């Protein structure tokens, strides 16, 4: 059972979570609990580090920011003990949750289970501090933002849990953002692949790395609300879903910026010449389209980067202008990526055509298209975000009755 920052935001909520854990214990289940820091605490700790030194020591940063989870972990154990539940807190280094040494974005390598199994056999509830581990040099590490989800899945995989429940401030995974489409429906089940696409395309319900890990170790995930007592959405293997929806959801990401290089010489190695320096500068490129001129001598290259990398990408490309020999660099950050996702696409034709028709009927121009086996993404002008999402939600029959 993993509880996010809003679920443990204050003492009253921690007490409510403890009651929820006790119910599972009373039902005869062996329970491991993973907690985040109270909402807002991590941001405060990060700000203090930045205020002291913009280029701070990443190892000391981890010591500071990991303290948020240490507090909630101890408080949760106390709350459970007050209800008569045998519980103890576990910090990352105590388990130990072994990670690599990439401070601030460490990856989990191993979680030994012997000591935990012995405690579970005695009926003890283990309360873990999420988001943290210990490196090979015995120093505290953190897993990056949203890392408590990853901690929860890793613990579930390590102890062979039947299920990993992620309690959050939403009651499940919806066909799209309910704030944009009032008729969005909650899904009972969704596949790992679909959830992965949704998470990477802007749906903030689950952190991408946690879904990747769940998929790899076949951990069944359930997303549900801390504040309402009702079933959530199960994230499962494709085989567990009998009736595959044609399309499961519509996702959108505002974190996109478009760059076009015009009249680049069309010769071997030109793409490597453009994208090599961007990769060296840690700029992640997403959608790519190439148009070759009529005479076959030049090409226009259009691609997208995240808004955070936009300025750096332009700087890198301008610095390589003499080598790349392009005519113009045209940039636009007022774009949004809208995606249609569904494992049903593998076996059905006409999905893309329906998307293009729905957007055309609303007068929305498509700037870039990219596809994978289970998704189609288009880039459109940002002012059409809500119109596009609503139109596609209706076009694929996702609106609730």
Image: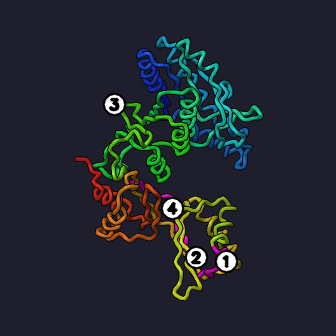
Q: Residue at x 55, y 41 (%)?
A: 216
Under circle 4, the secondary element is strand
- Disc 4 crowd rating (10 Å Cα; few below 14, some 14-19, many 20+) is many
Badge nearest the viewer, 4 or 1: 1
Quadrant for residue 227, please give it.
top left
Q: Which secondary structure type mostly characterizes the magenta part of the structure?
A: strand
Q: Earlier in the sequence, mark 1 or mark 3?
A: 3
CA–CA distance in space, label 3 to label 2 = 51 Å
| Spot occupied by residue 344 in the image (x, y as percentages of width and height) | 37, 52
Residue extending furthest toward the right = 137
Residue wearing tag 4: 256
Side of 341 where 43 appears, left or right: right
Q: Residue at x 63, y 31 (%)?
A: 67
Badge nearest the viewer, 2 or 4: 2
Q: Are marks 2 and 1 in contact (CB under 8 Å)?
A: yes
Residue extending furthest toward the bottom = 295
CA–CA distance in space, label 2 to label 1 = 10 Å
The span shown in magenta is 250-270
Q: Residue at x 35, y 47 (%)?
A: 244
CA–CA distance in space, label 1 to label 3 = 57 Å
Residue wearing tag 1: 324
Q: Residue at x 35, y 61 (%)?
A: 349
Q: How is the image coloured?
A: rainbow
Residue 168 visible: yes
Residue wearing tag 2: 261
Q: Are marks 4 and 1 in contact (CB under 8 Å)?
A: no
CA–CA distance in space, label 3 to label 4 = 35 Å
| Spot occupied by residue 273 in the image (x, y as percentages of width and height) | 67, 72
Residue wearing tag 3: 230
Side of 194 where 70 appears, left or right: right
222 is higher (above) or lower (below) than 32: below
């Amino acid at each position: 059972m993993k509880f996010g920052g809003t679920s443990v935001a204050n003492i009253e909520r921690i007490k409510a979570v403890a009651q929820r854990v006790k119910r599972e214990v009373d039902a005869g289940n062996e329970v491991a609990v993973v907690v985040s820091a109270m909402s807002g605490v991590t941001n405060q700790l990060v700000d203090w580090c930045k205020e002291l030194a913009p280029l701070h020591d990443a190892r000391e940063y981890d010591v500071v920011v990991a303290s948020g989870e240490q507090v909630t972990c101890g408080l949760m154990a106390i709350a459970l003990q007050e209800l008569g539940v045998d519980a103890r807190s576990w910090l990352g280094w105590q388990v130990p949750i072994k990670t690599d040494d990439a401070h601030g974005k460490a990856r989990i390598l191993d979680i030994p289970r012997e000591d935990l199994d012995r405690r579970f056999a005695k009926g003890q509830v283990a309360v873990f501090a999420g988001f943290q581990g210990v490196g090979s040099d015995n120093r505290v590490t953190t897993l990056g933002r949203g890392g408590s989800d990853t901690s929860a899945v890793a613990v579930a995989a390590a102890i062979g849990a039947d299920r990993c429940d992620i309690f959050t401030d939403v009651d499940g995974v919806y066909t799209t953002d309910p704030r944009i489409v009032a008729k969005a429906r909650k899904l009972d089940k969704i596949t790992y692949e679909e959830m992965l696409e949704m998470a990477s395309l802007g749906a903030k319900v689950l952190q991408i790395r946690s879904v990747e890990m769940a998929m790899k170790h076949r951990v069944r995930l359930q997303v549900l609300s801390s504040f309402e007592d009702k079933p959530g959405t199960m994230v499962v293997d494709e085989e567990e879903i009998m009736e595959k929806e044609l399309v499961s959801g519509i996702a959108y990401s505002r974190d996109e910026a478009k760059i076009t290089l015009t009249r680049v010489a069309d010769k071997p190695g030109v793409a490597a010449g453009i994208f090599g320096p961007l990769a060296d500068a840690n700029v992640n490129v997403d959608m790519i389209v190439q148009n070759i001129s009529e005479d076959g001598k030049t090409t226009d290259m259009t691609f997208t980067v995240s808004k955070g990398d936009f300025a750096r990408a332009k700087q890198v490309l301008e610095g390589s202008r003499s080598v790349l020999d392009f005519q113009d660099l045209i940039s636009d950050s007022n774009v949004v990526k809208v995606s249609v996702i569904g494992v049903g696409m593998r076996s059905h034709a006409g999905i893309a055509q329906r998307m293009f028709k729905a957007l055309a009927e609303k007068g929305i121009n498509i700037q870039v298209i990219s596809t994978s086996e289970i998704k189609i993404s288009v880039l459109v002008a940002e002012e059409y975000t809500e119109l596009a999402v609503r139109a596609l939600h209706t076009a694929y029959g996702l609106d609730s009755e």
